[in-house]
Amino acid sequence: MTVKMIATDMDGTFLRDDKKYDVDRFREQLKFMDEKKIQFVAASGNQFYQLKDFFTPITNQYKIDFVADNGARIFMANKLIYEATVTREQLQKVIEWNAKNPASHNNLIILTGNHGAYVSNHAVDQVLTEVKSFYNPVYQVEKLLEIQDEIFKVTFVWPNKQVQAYVTALLAIFGDELHATGSGFGSVDVLARGVNKASGLSKLQAAYNITADEIVAFGDNNNDLEMLNYVGTGYVMPNAYPAMHEVGFKEALADNNHDGVLVTIDQILENI
């Protein structure tokens, strides 16, 4: 198997539940990958700023690329090469849909922009603390529709973790102009049409002249489906959502809390 790119989701996949990973082990893998000209990509619903923070101990030595915001922003190291925004009109439509949806009474709206993430100033401290574990920086605002920033992603977070019905409803109404996907932890991301992790990888793939068959990817959730179907070899985590195990992907050698991505990468690199 020829491998020229390895891409991985972060939460529930590359990262342990405490948001940590084996830095020294990963550094050694990157050293080998750098010698073999294999690109490493963090492909996540997280913002670019948050993703950079995870890899601060390493990026001064080795280059990492980023498919951030579920594909809405693509970076080669620190260089932005692509972004897709949600228009003001689209933003208003989906927020109005949420306001009229009876099941959305207690949900949280997060807007991801160029300068950070935005939530209502009505968010309580406990909720704000949880948001800050996924977004950096976070700003509280009075009116979401008056934010002076480009918005790449709208996230709705429901207390009920079963969100597929909301994804289906959003796609039924807005599918001609927007994309919606479940993103774990009771959240649904709304993005520009055609934007997902696979479309993000395709931008990097073109830049490096790599074929999809030469890419390996890891994931655990619905927002990884397009990516895992797109690449030559897709791995699903043992701890993934049950439906992910029914698609026919390979299974990583351990779960996220036992460094499953790193363990599997070691096996892949041994055969190169």
Image (tube, helix red, strand yellow):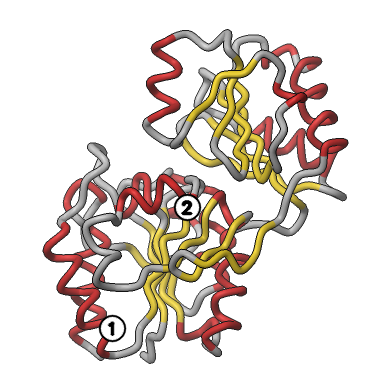
Rendering coords of residue 42 (x, y %): 41, 61
Can you tell which quarter of the image residue 117 is in?
top right
Q: Is residue 94 above or below residue 261?
A: above
Numbered label attached to residue 123: none
Left or right: residue 219 versus residue 157 is left
Q: Residues within 10 Å of mark 2 (few under 14, many from 20)?
A: many
Above or below, 14 against 187 in this view is below
In the depicted view, which residue is nearer to us: 214 or 65? 65
Disc 1: CA contacts within 10 A as few (<14), some (14-19) or many (>=20) = some
Which of 258/115 is in front?
A: 115
> In the image, 100: left or right of 252?
right
Residue at horizontal 26%, vertical 50%? 256
Q: CA distance from mark 1 to mark 2?
A: 22 Å
**Amino acid identity at mark 2:** Ser
> With 77 as the anchor, is 202 left or right in this view?
right
Q: Could you tell me which residue is drawn at 21 percent across and 57 percent down?
A: 57
Using the image, tell me which numbered label, if any, was put on residue 34: 1
Q: What is the x, y in percent for residue 214?
A: 46, 85
Q: Quadrant of residue 203?
A: bottom right
Q: Identity of the amino acid at label 1? A: Asp
Quadrant in which the N terminus is drawn = bottom left
Q: Nearer the viewer, residue 246 or 112?
A: 112
At 20% from the left and 52% from the top, the residue drawn is 21
Residue carrying label 2: 44
Q: Position of residue 148 (x, y in %)?
A: 72, 33
In the displayed image of the protein, which residue is found farthest to the left? Answer: 24
